[in-house]
Image (tube, rainbow, N blue to C red):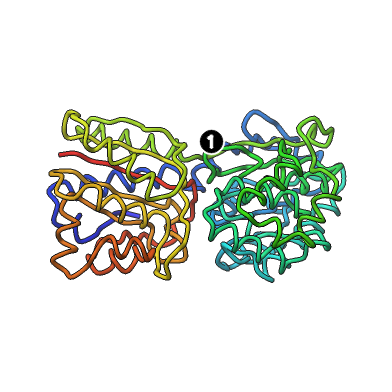
Amino acid sequence: MKTISTNTLQHHPFGNQISNILVASLQAVEPGQAIQRFVKREKDHLHIAKQIYQLDSLDHITVLGLGKATQSMSHALLDILPPHTTRGLLIPKQTFPSPVAGFEVCAGGHPVPDQNSFIAGNKAREIASNLNEKDLLICLISGGGSALMTSPFPEVGLENLQTLTQALLSCGARIDEINTLRRHLDRVKGGRIAESAVPARVAGLILSDVVGNPLEAIASGPTAPDPSTKTDALNILEKYGLTKKFKETIVRFLEQAAETPKPDDSIFSRVQNVLIGSNQLAAQAGLEQAQALSFHTKFLGDAWQGEARDVAKKLCLHLKENLPRPFCLIAGGETTVTVRGNGRGGRNQELALAAAIELKELDNVMLITLATDGEDGSTDAAGAIVTGETFQHAIHSGLAPTQFLDNNDSYSFFETLGDLIKTGPTGTNVNDLTFMFGF
């Protein structure tokens, strides 16, 4: 990716510099480069972070890749591994040609798991269950994996899991809450891939798309111990008023089910989990690029969560401070949207639209929201850009910003103004970034 452009950036005196900052953030978490930083091979020794694996002691290396970054991660890994010992299953969002013989690509559904996700999940479970003590299972885990790979317990079933996922997404549940439920309802989540792989050794290479990087929440933690309990899962259903709706299915199952593997379980003595990329890493790269371009910089943290329109108000307060200019502030996290209208959009676009209302008539400021995977909600946009002039530009174009916000129709709003950010799928996924500039 060489540049990012919108109508506003094309005509802004700092447009090229801002584009360079955005691109630097995305390039820093390019999955292939992340793999290469943490995985090396020297003759018969495979180095994964600080762990060394003797290749001549292994029967096979099996690779299980799942998530939006699967293609880039798998290509980089397979350039390092000895090909004659390697086989595996790759579960991306979009189908791509199998990288080598012995690999199967099985794309799943997202953000709601579909029948292909179910097929992929059952295949992953079968592969893990057929390993022996001389096998190494390398799991490439990235955002989106929770939906792309699923194998719900028979008492739950795919249809109930789909209905639950849709309900949680619509009512504004946080991704960590959704994944807590998924871990307790699924046979390939909450450490259960690691459990199925016993007695093999397991190495998880993890690209985080979750605020705070808890390993159990990233793709619902197929190789990580689960600190949450069934009671936690039931409380989330209660919080969002879903207990009655799922009383005879999911609630009944949770009340009777066994707990997920916990941190003190012996199965994790043969498991290595390595975090290879995160939202903070992307933000820091953007700040370094901004510093090189003579911006004053500040990192506002990577734990921003909550309703997108509420978070927008809090973030915009920083643009109203008396800061030395030019400045670049970067915040990371993942907001949610409670859907009340019937428009199109995503959490980043909604945040930007709410910010446009907050910043109206504020001079020489800019706010940009960006989903690092390039896909915000179910749209082809990653986010949007606003300035203090966006509100008035909209009014002059016959658009009423508050009406579009009420209808959750941020995509149509920014499409008309030419200020949607469209990167296409980036091949990575480390949550969302908000860039704020003052000139």
Q: Please report the residue visible at 64 percent of the width from the left and 28 percent of the height from the top.
A: 50
- Left or right: 326 in relation to 161: left
Q: Which residue is mark 1?
A: 212
Question: In the rendering, at what x and y percent does residue 403 appear?
Answer: 30, 65
In this orientation, which residue lies closer to the viewer: 261 or 317?
317
Q: Quadrant of residue 116?
A: bottom right
Disc 1 is placed on an element classified as: loop
Q: Please report the residue visible at 36 percent of the width from the left and 59 percent of the height from the top.
A: 423
In this orientation, which residue lies closer to the viewer: 301 or 191?
301
Q: In the figure, 265 relative to 137: above or below?
A: above
Q: Please report the residue visible at 46 percent of the width from the left and 45 percent of the height from the top.
A: 306
- Left or right: 275 in relation to 157: left
Please state which amino acid type lies under the numbered disc 1.
Answer: Gly
In this orientation, which residue lies closer to the viewer: 310 or 271?
310
Question: In the rendering, at what x and y percent does residue 161 appear?
Answer: 70, 62
- Left or right: 361 in relation to 385: left
Specify the quadrant that holds the N terminus: bottom left
In this orientation, which residue lies closer to the viewer: 89 or 219?
219
Q: Residues within 10 Å of mark 1 (few under 14, many from 20)?
A: some
Q: Please report the residue visible at 53 percent of the width from the left and 46 percent of the height from the top.
A: 209
Question: In the rendering, at what x and y percent does residue 66 appear?
Answer: 63, 55
Specify the quadrant that holds the C terminus: top left
Can residue 160 be seen from the camera position used here? yes
Question: In the rendering, at what x and y percent does residue 28 appear?
Answer: 42, 42
